[in-house]
Image (tube, rainbow, N blue to C red):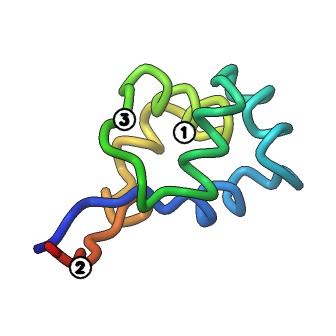
Amino acid sequence: MLRLQIKGSEILKMSGEANNHRLALKARVSYPTVDRWINRSQNVQSIDLAALANLLLDGIGLSPDELLARPLGDFFELVEVDQN
């Protein structure tokens, strides 16, 4: 089975921040949320879209137009998961 998974480490790289805490402060998203998205993305079951927008717009520094022009694959990937 395939699932959509956030590319947490790629988003951290895009942000230019050194760590999850700095990214959380910059994006105005709670540290536990950012930490889960970056370090344990395989365990994320749902994503708050307001928090995701803050992460991508404020955390990475994209404008709304730049964000709309980016492919979904820049931020998410399809991964195979074991159904056992």
Q: Residue at x 63, y 58 (%)?
A: 39
Q: Is mark 1 on a helix, strand or loop?
A: helix
* Quadrant (top left, top right, bottom left, bottom right) of the N terminus: bottom left
Check disc 2 and give the amino acid type: Glu
Residue 23, image x and y in percent? 76, 39
Question: Quarter of the image holding residue 81?
Answer: bottom left
Cα–Cα gap, marks 1 and 3: 13 Å
Cα–Cα gap, marks 2 and 3: 19 Å
What residue is disc 1 on? Answer: 56
Q: Outermost residue toward the front?
A: 84
Residue 26, image x and y in percent? 78, 29
User: Of the residues under marks 1 and 2, which one precedes in the sequence?
Assistant: 1
What residue is disc 2 on? Answer: 80
Check if mark 1's residue and mark 2's residue have beta carbons within 8 Å. no
Which of these two is toward me, 2 or 18?
2
User: Of the residues under marks 1 and 3, which one precedes in the sequence?
Assistant: 3
What residue is disc 3 on? Answer: 47
Check if mark 2's residue and mark 3's residue have beta carbons within 8 Å. no
Check disc 1 and give the amino acid type: Leu
Question: Quarter of the image holding residue 21?
Answer: top right
